[in-house]
Image (cartoon, grey):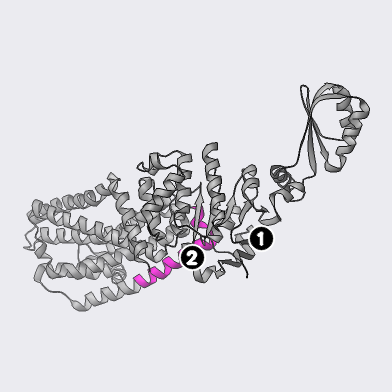
């Protein structure tokens, strides 16, 4: 792996982003949008509910953690289709750049964008709703890492499909996180789900992380065994996704889709 | 000592039921300029993409710089570069930014000096600070060529290097390519400009329907077309000349007083003797020897046999 080539991908992305108002807009708009909707909704719920649980904090915490997952699942894939739309794919991969170096480069860029989005969200949540970062406490670290990794895993799968099948499957870039949202129990506890869905949800690393977020924010407790299961599933899925991605890339070279589509 | 830069052995590429490249073998020596010619869809681009490692061959073997491609792709690509009119650079980036990114990907030492040098050579100065998507196709082609020379590659793959260039810039590019060869660079290029190929290439591989159907110097390939065109500007006896050509079975084109008669090399003496016997007179006569373009047209129209 060559650091110079990874830096080239990062610089390229920086040049690209700074000239594309929609990319900059994307970093700030969607987090703000989600925060407004769920913040207002949680205020409404808290006014009509007498449960005593801090609904506003829990829902805002969920929105913020959800953003880790949502953005991680999209940003890398968007970088990939950007290269394809711009017919720059052949240009890049006819150089000594390896797929791994490319992935590392876009992952670093995606992480920087994610951090900017999240900092902005914390700031906005604090200004609008008085939400404190401390309400997520130390739990922010494992949950943010776990959800980001799961987002990257899904992004790798989507990228593998795009490389293999071309532009027709691009819609999954924006849809994949939403498809996993109901089973991840972002805004409600696992116990709400019907039994069949509960069984499926337990195979998702995200479910355990959102469950424990609510647990932590309600009473400061975390079930570490569940966090361990979540990270175990994450590691397994990430490995499988990487294998799938590399195989798809190789398959695209065999079938020629890599040059036909891009 | 074996000085092959590219060695291709029994290369085949199949896409589903379609055989794009069929069992081709060739080699290119270090310092050679070789033209890869053929009609659209012949398999030229597929071959180039296999040499770049962007397409995996169905079977066969590629060695570049004596190294096996599968095991040494990174090392090979470091010493190779590619330019094509049909791929793009990042559109929102300025020309200079794109070149800097490429220089970094190839780990070019003295990148700024190299960029400045090739900007001068390909006359990029006036648009170095412009976004790539604002350039004309001709300007883009010049940028791709500058990019292709940036890492001082040992092997250069050029797909239509002078397409969409003004004649003066195309000439400049041809000079640069010939100069590069003098410095030991090996070049494999595709072009639809046969005159350009005749001037630049040491050797031509003619590919049709995925197979190499001819391999020789441009002059020798042109000689395979035995038809010679005799151009006459008639003074007297035009009708008799036409009748004679028709009777002898020579294809002919007339345009006012101008006649162009196509004859086989061996029949030229017969034609000239016949015209003398008829007592016709002409004010001008010229003979066009067959060119590579004639060979290309012949090969393309006769499905690979001359």
Residue A257 in the magenta stretch? The answer is yes
Between B269 and A4, which is closer to the camera in this rendering?
B269
Between A25 and A90, which is closer to the camera in this rendering?
A90
Q: How crowded is mark 2: few (under 14 residues within 10 Å), some or many (20 or more)?
A: some
Give the image location of residue B251, x and y in percent. 82, 34
User: At 76% from the left edge and 50% from the top edge, which residue is drawn?
Assistant: B305
The residue singled out by tag 2 in the image is A250
Between B155 and A123, which is closer to the camera in this rendering?
B155
Give the image location of residue A193, x and y in percent. 25, 66
Give the image location of residue A66, x and y in percent. 23, 60
> Magenta region: which residues?
A238-262
User: At 8% from the left edge and 63% from the top edge, which residue is drawn?
Assistant: A53
Q: Is residue B269 left or right of residue B306?
A: right
> In the figure, residue B32 lies in which quadrant?
bottom right
Question: Tag 2, which secondary structure?
Answer: helix
Q: Is residue B61 left or right of residue B215?
A: left
Q: How crowded is mark 1: few (under 14 residues within 10 Å), some or many (20 or more)?
A: many
Q: In this view, does B54 lie above or below A143?
A: above
Of the 4 image quadrants, the one containing the N terminus of chain A is bottom left
Query: In the drawing, what numbered circle is on residue B22?
Result: 1
| Residue B161 visible somewhere in the drawing | no
Q: Quick check: marks 1 and 2 in contact, CB under 8 Å?
A: no
Chain identifier of the residue bearing label 1 in the image: B
| Residue A250 visible somewhere in the drawing | yes
Q: Is residue B103 above or below residue B233?
A: below
Q: Is residue B206 left or right of residue B53?
A: right
In terms of secondary structure, what is the magenta stretch mainly? helix
User: At 38% from the left edge and 50% from the top edge, which residue is drawn?
Assistant: B98
Q: In this view, does A96 lie above or below B292?
A: below
């Amino acid at each position: 792996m060559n650091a110079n080539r990874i830096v080239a991908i990062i610089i390229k992305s920086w040049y690209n982003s700074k000239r594309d108002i929609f990319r900059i807009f994307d970093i700030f708009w969607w987090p703000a949008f989600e925060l407004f909707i769920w913040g207002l909704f949680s205020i409404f719920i808290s006014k009509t509910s007498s449960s005593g649980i801090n609904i506003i904090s829990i829902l805002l915490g969920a929105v913020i953690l959800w953003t880790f997952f949502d953005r991680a699942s999209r940003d890398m894939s968007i970088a990939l289709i950007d290269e394809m739309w711009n017919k720059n794919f052949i240009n890049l991969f006819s150089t000594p750049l390896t797929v791994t170096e490319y992935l590392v480069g876009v992952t670093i860029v995606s992480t920087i964008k994610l951090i900017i989005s999240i900092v902005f969200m914390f700031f906005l949540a604090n200004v609008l709703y008085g939400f404190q970062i401390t309400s997520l406490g130390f739990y922010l670290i494992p949950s943010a890492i776990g959800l980001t990794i799961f987002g990257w895993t899904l992004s790798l799968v989507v990228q593998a499909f795009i490389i293999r099948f071309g532009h027709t499957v691009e819609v999954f870039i924006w849809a994949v996180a939403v498809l996993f949202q109901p089973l991840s129990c972002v805004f409600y506890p696992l116990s709400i789900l019907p039994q069949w869905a509960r069984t499926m949800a337990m195979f998702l690393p995200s479910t355990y992380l959102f469950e424990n977020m609510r647990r932590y924010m309600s009473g400061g407790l975390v079930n570490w065994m569940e966090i361990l299961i979540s990270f175990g599933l994450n590691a397994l899925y990430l490995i499988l996704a990487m294998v799938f991605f590399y195989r798809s890339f190789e398959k695209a070279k065999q079938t020629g889709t890599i040059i036909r589509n891009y | 000592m074996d000085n092959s830069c590219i060695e291709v052995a029994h290369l085949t590429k199949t896409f589903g039921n379609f055989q794009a490249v069929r069992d081709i073998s060739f080699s290119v020596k270090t310092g050679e300029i070789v033209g890869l010619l053929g009609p659209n869809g012949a398999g030229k681009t597929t071959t180039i993409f296999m040499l770049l490692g962007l397409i995996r061959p169905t079977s066969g073997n590629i060695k570049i710089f004596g190294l096996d491609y599968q095991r040494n792709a990174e090392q090979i690509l470091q010493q190779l570069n590619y330019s094509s009119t049909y791929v793009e650079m990042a559109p929102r980036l300025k020309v200079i930014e794109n070149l800097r990114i490429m220089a970094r990907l190839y780990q070019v030492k003295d990148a700024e000096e190299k960029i400045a040098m090739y900007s001068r050579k390909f006359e990029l100065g006036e648009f170095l600070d412009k976004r790539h998507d604002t350039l004309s196709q001709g300007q883009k082609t010049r940028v791709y060529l500058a990019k292709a020379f940036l890492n001082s590659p040992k092997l250069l793959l050029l797909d239509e290097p002078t397409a969409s260039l003004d004649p003066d810039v195309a000439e400049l590019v041809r000079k640069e390519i010939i100069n590069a060869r003098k410095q030991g660079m090996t070049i494999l290029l595709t072009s639809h400009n046969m005159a350009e190929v005749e001037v630049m290439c040491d050797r031509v591989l003619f590919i049709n329907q995925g197979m190499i159907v001819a391999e020789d110097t441009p002059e020798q390939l042109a000689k395979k077309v035995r038809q010679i065109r005799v151009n006459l500007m008639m003074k007297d006896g035009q009708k008799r000349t036409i009748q004679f050509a028709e009777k002898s079975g020579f294809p002919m084109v007339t345009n006012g007083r101008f006649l162009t008669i196509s004859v086989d090399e061996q029949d030229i003496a017969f034609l000239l003797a016949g015209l003398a016997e008829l007592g016709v007179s002409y004010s001008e006569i010229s003979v066009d020897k067959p060119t590579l373009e004639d060979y290309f047209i012949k090969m393309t129209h006769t499905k690979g046999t001359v």
